[in-house]
Image: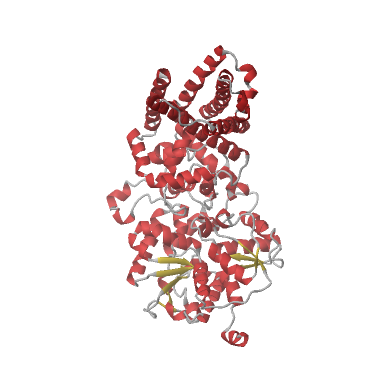
C-alpha cells in the first residue's frame, strides 16, 4: 500500500510539473491556467452535461463517437470502482468491518466486468481510427494516442486477471455469474508470479498515463474544459474585438497590429485553444465549403496552426495557409457548433483575414469594391443612400422624424433597400403590419439608414465595421430606439451580439427577427390565417438558427399554414446557403456551388414551397433554382410572403363567424 500511495503522490507532482512545462511553452503560467478553470466554475456543470450526452460527438460521425463514448464511461466507472474499493478498505480499518459487501459487492463486480470489455473494445475501435488517419497527426500525437489506447486495453485485461486471481484464491466459484471475466480467465490466473507481475504493472501504468497526460494529445480532455470556459456564454455569432476604435489615438493607430500571419502573433490563450484539436474530422465533415470542394478544411486550418506551434514553424500566411482557404469560409459556424473541444475556428480565420485586409492590404477587385461601397455610400450595394426608402413612404411607412412616437424601428437593410426581390419581402411585411393595425407604431430611418457593418467585419475590415456601428448606435440613441425589427439575420446577429460590445447601451434594445415578430402577432390574435394544403420546407439561415438559436417561431408559423417537411439539415444543424462571411460579394474556387447543394437537400423533401428567412438565402436559392432550371418545380418565398398570402381579411372573418 505504501508503494501504491507513494506512486500516486509522485503522479500528482509529475502531472502538475508537466502541465507547467506544456503551458509555459505557449506563454501561459500554471497558476494562470488553474485560476481560469477555477473562476469559470459556473461553466463546469453545462460542460459536464455536454460531455455526458456526447451530443457534439455523435452529430457527424459513428466510429469515433462510439469509441470515445465507450472509453469515457469505462474510465469513469473504473474510477468510481477504485474509489469504492479504497473506501471499503479504509472503513474496514477504522470500524473493523466492510460496508460495501454482499449483493452490492456482487453487483459492483458485474459492472466492473462489463466496464473492462467496454474499455477494451472502445480502445480497439480508437486504435483502428488512429491507424486509418495517421497522416493527419503529428508524430507526437500519433504515438501518444496509440500509447494511451494500448495502455487502456492493457489496464482492462490486467484488471480482469487480478480479479480472476482473487476469484480463484477466495473460492468464489458459486458467484461466477457476477464475475464472468474471472471465470473466463481462470485458466491463466492461477500463477502467483503472474499475479504479482500484473499487479505491479497495472497500477504503475495507470499512474504513468495520468502523469504524462499534459505532454500528450490526450491533454485535450483538460483543454476542452478550458476552451468551454474562455468562450462560456459568448454567442456563436460574436467575433472578437481586436481594438476599440473610440479609444484609438493618432499615435496608437499607427502602432496598431490587427490579426496575425504567423503562430507567434496568436494570443497565448488562443494558442492553448488550438492545441486542443484532436484531428477528429467533425468540423470538416460539417463544413459546407469543404462539401462544395472549396480549398478549405477548418480542421486543417487548426492543424496547420498546431503544427506550427509544435515545430516552431512560424509562417501561416504565405506559408502553410493559402489566401483562398481563408476566403472560402462562409462563417456559418457549423465547425464551431460540432467541435467536441469547443474550438472557435472562425476566430482564427477572421484574424488572418484582418491581417490580409488591414495590414497586408491584399484583396481582389470584388472585395475592394465592397469596401469602397461601404466607404463611399455607407451601404454594401454601391447605391446612393439618397431616397433609399422613398418607395416605402409610398406604402404609408413613416420615417422616425415623421413618427416620433414610434414603438418599433424597422431596419430595412441594404438588400431590403436596394434589391427588387427583397423589396417584395419588405412590402409583404408592411401589408401584414397594416392588417394588424400596427403601421403607425413602425418607423424607418430613411436616408439615415446605412449598412449594419456585418460584411465589413466578416471580410476583415474591423475599422470600417466599428465606424458604421458607432454611427448607427448614435442614431439609435438620438431617436431613443427601444425595439428593432429586421428581416436580415446578419443585421439581427450584429445588433444583438456585436453592437453591445461596441457600446453597452445597446443592451437596452430588443432586437427581433421578423419571424419572431410575426409569431407574436399571431399569438396575440392580431392577424388570422387560413391553413392551406401546401407542403413547406424551411431553410434555416445560419445566423438565425445556429448562431442565435431561433428555430421555433418559423416552425410554429408554417405548421399553422400547411404541412411542414424537414430536410436532414435543419434547425441549429442547418446547411449554409453560401452567402455568409461576405461571400455574397466575391467568388471562391469551388467544384459545386454551396447554394446548389443546399437547394438539392431542400428539394429532396418534395415540398412545394421553400420558406426562407433571410434576403441573402432567398437570393442564393432563387439563383440556384434558376441555374438548375427548377423554378417551375418549387417556389422560394420568405416567411412574410407566405403569411401575407394566407391572412384572412376582416370581411372574411365576419363571413366565417
- Residue 325 vs 238, above or below: the answer is above
Percent x, y for residue 195? 55, 16
In this view, the residue in front, 448 or 516, is 516
Q: Residue at x 34, y 47 (%)?
A: 256
Percent x, y for residue 471? 36, 64
Asked if one can make out residue 261 in the rendered structure from this viewpoint, the answer is no
Asked if one can make out residue 410 in the rendered structure from this viewpoint, the answer is yes
Q: Residue at x 40, y 22 (%)?
A: 5
- Residue 113 vs 446, above or below: the answer is above
In this view, the residue in front, 526 or 357, is 526
In this view, the residue in front, 521 or 165, is 165
- Residue 646 vs 11, above or below: the answer is below
Q: Residue at x 44, y 64 (%)?
A: 451
Percent x, y for residue 437? 48, 82
**Is the N terminus in the top left, top right, bottom left or bottom right quadrant?**
top left
**Is the C terminus in the top left, top right, bottom left or bottom right quadrant?**
bottom right
Amino acid at each position: 500500500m505504501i508503494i501504491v500511495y507513494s506512486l500516486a503522490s509522485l503522479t500528482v507532482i509529475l502531472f502538475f510539473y508537466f502541465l507547467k512545462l506544456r503551458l509555459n511553452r505557449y506563454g501561459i503560467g500554471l497558476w494562470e491556467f488553474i485560476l481560469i478553470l477555477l473562476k469559470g466554475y459556473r461553466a463546469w456543470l453545462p460542460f459536464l452535461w455536454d460531455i455526458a450526452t456526447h451530443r457534439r460527438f455523435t452529430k457527424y460521425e459513428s466510429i469515433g463517437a462510439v469509441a470515445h463514448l465507450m472509453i469515457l464511461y469505462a474510465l469513469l466507472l473504473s474510477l468510481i470502482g477504485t474509489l469504492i474499493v479504497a473506501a471499503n478498505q479504509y472503513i474496514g480499518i477504522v470500524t473493523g468491518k466492510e460496508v460495501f459487501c454482499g449483493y452490492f459487492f456482487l453487483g459492483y463486480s458485474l459492472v466492473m466486468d462489463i466496464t473492462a470489455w467496454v474499455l477494451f473494445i472502445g480502445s480497439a475501435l480508437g486504435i483502428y481510427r488512429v491507424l486509418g488517419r495517421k497522416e493527419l497527426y503529428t508524430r507526437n500525437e500519433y504515438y501518444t494516442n496509440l500509447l494511451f489506447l494500448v495502455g487502456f486495453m492493457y489496464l482492462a485485461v490486467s484488471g480482469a486477471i487480478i480479479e480472476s486471481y482473487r476469484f480463484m484464491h477466495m473460492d468464489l466459484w458459486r458467484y461466477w455469474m457476477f464475475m464472468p471475466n474471472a471465470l473466463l480467465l481462470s485458466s491463466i490466473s492461477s500463477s502467483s508470479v503472474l499475479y504479482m507481475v500484473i499487479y505491479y504493472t497495472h497500477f504503475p501504468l495507470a499512474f504513468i498515463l495520468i502523469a504524462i497526460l499534459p505532454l500528450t494529445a490526450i491533454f485535450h480532455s483538460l483543454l476542452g474544459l478550458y476552451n468551454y470556459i474562455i468562450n462560456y456564454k459568448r454567442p456563436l455569432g460574436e467575433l472578437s474585438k481586436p481594438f476599440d476604435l473610440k479609444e484609438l489615438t493618432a499615435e496608437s493607430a499607427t502602432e496598431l497590429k490587427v490579426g496575425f500571419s504567423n503562430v507567434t502573433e496568436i494570443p497565448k490563450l488562443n494558442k492553448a485553444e488550438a492545441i486542443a484539436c484532436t484531428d477528429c474530422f467533425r468540423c470538416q465533415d460539417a463544413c459546407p465549403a469543404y462539401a462544395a470542394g472549396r480549398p478549405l478544411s477548418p480542421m486543417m486550418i487548426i492543424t496547420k496552426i498546431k503544427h506550427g506551434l509544435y515545430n516552431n514553424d512560424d509562417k501561416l500566411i504565405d506559408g502553410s495557409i493559402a489566401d483562398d482557404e481563408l476566403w472560402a469560409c462562409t462563417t456559418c459556424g457549423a465547425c464551431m457548433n460540432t467541435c467536441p473541444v469547443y474550438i472557435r475556428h472562425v476566430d482564427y480565420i477572421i484574424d488572418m483575414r484582418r491581417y490580409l485586409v488591414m495590414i497586408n492590404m491584399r484583396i481582389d477587385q470584388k472585395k475592394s469594391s465592397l469596401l469602397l461601397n461601404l466607404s463611399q455610400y455607407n451601404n454594401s450595394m454601391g447605391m446612393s443612400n439618397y431616397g433609399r426608402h422613398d418607395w416605402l413612404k409610398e406604402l404609408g411607412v413613416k420615417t422616425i422624424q415623421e413618427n416620433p412616437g414610434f414603438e418599433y424601428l424597422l431596419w430595412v437593410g441594404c438588400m431590403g433597400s436596394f434589391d427588387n426581390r427583397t423589396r417584395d419581402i419588405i412590402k409583404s411585411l408592411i401589408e401584414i403590419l397594416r392588417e394588424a393595425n400596427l403601421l403607425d407604431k413602425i418607423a424607418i430611418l430613411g436616408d439615415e439608414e446605412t449598412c449594419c457593418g456585418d460584411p465589413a467585419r466578416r471580410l476583415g475590415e474591423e475599422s470600417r465595421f466599428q465606424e458604421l456601428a458607432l454611427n448607427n448606435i448614435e442614431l439609435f440613441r438620438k431617436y431613443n430606439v427601444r425595439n428593432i425589427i429586421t428581416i436580415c439575420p446578419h443585421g439581427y446577429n450584429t445588433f444583438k451580439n456585436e453592437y453591445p460590445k461596441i457600446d453597452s447601451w445597446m443592451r437596452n434594445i430588443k432586437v427581433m427577427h421578423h419571424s419572431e415578430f410575426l409569431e407574436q402577432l399571431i399569438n396575440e390574435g392580431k392577424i388570422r390565417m387560413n391553413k392551406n394544403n401546401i407542403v413547406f420546407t424551411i431553410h434555416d439561415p445560419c445566423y438565425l438558427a445556429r448562431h442565435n438559436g431561433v428555430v421555433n417561431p418559423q416552425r410554429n408559423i408554417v405548421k399553422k399554414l400547411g404541412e411542414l417537411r424537414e430536410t436532414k439539415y435543419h434547425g441549429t444543424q442547418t446547411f449554409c446557403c453560401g452567402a455568409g462571411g461576405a461571400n455574397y460579394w466575391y467568388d471562391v474556387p469551388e467544384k459545386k456551388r454551396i447554394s446548389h447543394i443546399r437547394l438539392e437537400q431542400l428539394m429532396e423533401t418534395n415540398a412545394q414551397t421553400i420558406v426562407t428567412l433571410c434576403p441573402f438565402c432567398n437570393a442564393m436559392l432563387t439563383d440556384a433554382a434558376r441555374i438548375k432550371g427548377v423554378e417551375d418545380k418549387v417556389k422560394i418565398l420568405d416567411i412574410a410572403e407566405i403569411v401575407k398570402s394566407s391572412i384572412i381579411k376582416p370581411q372574411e372573418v365576419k363571413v366565417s363567424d
